[in-house]
């Protein structure tokens, strides 16, 4: 949820909402931040809001977001049909509940949970991975507390070990539920959690180690298998039995289809829960996530609430109660419609678009690619010239003039001096749009060059007989020193010459 703010008076055009097309219905301005005294026609209300929303960015060109921005019309229709159903009313809407249960089992099998065909998987639908992570974290905390109490030990200082590249929802969980977040710092060139360092930070108060399958910074997968192996060794020595949670918000619907040989999920014995965002590469509009547990034993029963005032006994484990059914229905539509083959084709196409974008960026000669070829379908890149890294923000802003929304940001602590840009490749970002983005990017790069201050020129005389350079702030020795620049001179003719040269940046060695 974004906290509500009101624009200060100096930034407001007025304190009222004016209408153009709706003026045939509404003659007087309407208040912005309080309710009007009387009603207005529905056509006027629609037109006023519609016109103001035109100033929002185009979701299809929002390459900052992993969230799905296109679905088939048939699914759009199902979403409309399910909008008036409250998902939590399980007794009133048993088929919607059944579709949710099917989705949980489909995802559990996709993640290789040890569930038999006739056995129900353990999981729940959420409004996104943030809620899913909160629920998984609470389960780990409660299990750890129960174990410590049974051993007669203190349980007031729980912690989670993770990398400093985690998404902000982990920081929220730690702060809201009073759990220390012990972060493994990244280093330049290695922007994910180091499993060796992570296991070293584990202690008796660690409720879990959180690994990320698809870093939000550069799309890289963390080595969950190595983490599992190292943690198993430590658990044998200490007897702590520290578990693993995999934050697969972005990668959970990518890895099974593109990298089936990659072992990161419930095939690893210490992985006890996994979250994934249906509204990212699950191909559903914003508002749905999932958390799956390995078994019933990994979800403490005392966290599950049973209610009966909606009809029948309804077990529930969520942070919020009421929510729409549309996204659950849409998720099942995608599973039913796409199947394994369909998801695999979409992910392969996304990776191909990312490859073409990567090649186009490399051809400019301006950028280093920070993302990995094996990971999420995204391209993260930074200016090669470290002195120009600050241009990333200007580049991001300039691309907005063409409608593109591409974020520029610092990498996590310890590598915050690295500034990158990131393009998330979704299903609706096809090859034509890749080519158009590259063409606009080249235009913007040229404009940034044109906007750069002109390189200063000086005129100086070289007297080669005494081997002295005479000029403004010049001294001898074959090098002309000017504040902010150094020009290196190479003797070519044994006579006095007169030259006009360009100053070069002090970090760049040039010979003239």
Image: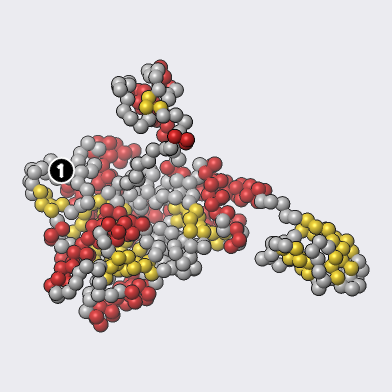
Q: Residue furthest front?
A: 9
Residue 350: give x, y in percent of width and height.
Answer: 43, 53
Q: Coloring scheme of the render?
A: secondary structure
Nearer to the camera, 312 or 152: 152
Pick the front one: 245 or 392: 392
**Which residue is located at x 34 percent, y 77 percent?**
200
Per the image, the residue denoted by label 1 is 89
Q: Residues within 10 Å of mark 1 (few under 14, many from 20)?
A: many
450 to 369, vertically: above or below: above
State left or right for residue 512 relative to residue 6. Answer: right
Q: Percent from the top left, x then y, of residue 402?
A: 54, 42
> Is residue 261 among the parts visible in the rendering?
no
Above or below, 55 against 269 in this view is above
Viewer-closest of 473 and 147: 473
Identify the residue at image location x=42%, y=25%. Answer: 18
Residue 170 in view, yes or no: yes
Vertical order, 63 against 201 (above or below): above
Point 56% across, 56% down: residue? 390
Residue 257 % position (x, y) = 35, 59
Residue 86, position as x, y percentages in the image: 19, 41
Give residue 6's quadrant in the image.
Answer: top left
Say what secondary structure mark 1 lies in.
Answer: loop
* Image point (30%, 54%), residue name: 130
Say which of 216 and 182 sits in front.
182
Q: Is residue 396 left or right of residue 22?
A: right
């Amino acid at each position: 949820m974004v906290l509500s703010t009101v624009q200060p008076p100096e930034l407001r055009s007025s304190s009222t909402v004016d209408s153009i097309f709706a003026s045939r219905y509404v003659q007087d301005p309407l208040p912005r931040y309080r309710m009007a005294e009387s009603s207005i026609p529905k056509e006027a209300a629609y037109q006023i809001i519609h016109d103001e929303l035109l100033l929002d960015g185009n979701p299809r060109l929002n390459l900052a977001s992993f969230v799905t921005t296109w679905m088939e019309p048939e699914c759009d229709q199902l979403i409309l049909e399910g909008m008036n159903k409250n998902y939590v009313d399980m007794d009133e809407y048993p088929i919607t509940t059944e579709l949710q249960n099917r989705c949980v089992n489909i995802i559990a099998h996709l993640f290789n949970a040890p569930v038999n065909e006739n056995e129900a998987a353990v999981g729940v639908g959420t409004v996104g991975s943030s809620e899913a992570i909160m629920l998984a974290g609470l389960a780990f905390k409660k299990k750890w507390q129960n174990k410590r109490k049974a051993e007669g030990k203190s349980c007031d200082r729980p912690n989670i070990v993770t990398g400093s590249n985690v998404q902000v929802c982990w920081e929220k969980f730690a702060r809201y539920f009073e759990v220390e977040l012990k972060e493994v710092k990244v280093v330049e060139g290695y922007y994910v959690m180091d499993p060796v360092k992570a296991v070293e930070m584990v202690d008796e108060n660690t409720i879990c180690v959180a690994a990320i399958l698809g870093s939000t910074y550069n799309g890289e997968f963390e080595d969950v298998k190595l983490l599992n192996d190292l943690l198993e060794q430590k658990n044998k020595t200490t007897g702590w039995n520290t578990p693993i949670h995999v934050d697969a918000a972005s990668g959970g619907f990518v890895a099974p289809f593109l990298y089936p040989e990659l072992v990161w999920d419930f095939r690893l014995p210490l992985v006890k829960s996994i979250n994934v965002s249906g509204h990212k590469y699950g191909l559903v509009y914003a508002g749905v996530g999932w958390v799956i547990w390995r078994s019933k034993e990994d979800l403490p029963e005392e966290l599950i609430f049973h209610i009966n005032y909606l009809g029948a006994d309804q077990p529930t484990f969520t942070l919020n109660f009421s929510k729409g059914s549309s996204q659950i229905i849409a998720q099942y539509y995608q599973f039913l419609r796409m199947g394994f083959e369909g998801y695999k084709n979409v992910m392969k196409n996304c990776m191909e678009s990312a490859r073409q974008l990567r090649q186009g960026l490399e051809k400019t000669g301006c950028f280093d690619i920070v993302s990995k070829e094996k990971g999420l379908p995204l391209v993260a890149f930074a200016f090669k010239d470290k002195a120009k890294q600050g241009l990333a923000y200007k580049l991001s802003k300039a691309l907005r003039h063409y409608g593109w929304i591409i974020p520029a940001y610092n990498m996590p602590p310890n590598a915050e001096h690295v500034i990158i840009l990131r393009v998330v490749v979704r299903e609706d970002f096809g090859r034509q749009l890749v080519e158009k983005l590259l063409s606009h990017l080249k235009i913007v790069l040229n404009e940034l060059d044109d906007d750069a201050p002109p390189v200063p020129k000086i005129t100086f005389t070289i007297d080669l007989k005494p081997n002295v350079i005479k000029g403004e702030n010049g001294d001898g020795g074959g090098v002309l020193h000017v504040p902010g620049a150094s020009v290196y001179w190479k003797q070519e003719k044994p006579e006095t010459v007169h030259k006009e040269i360009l100053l070069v940046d002090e970090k760049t060695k040039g010979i003239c």
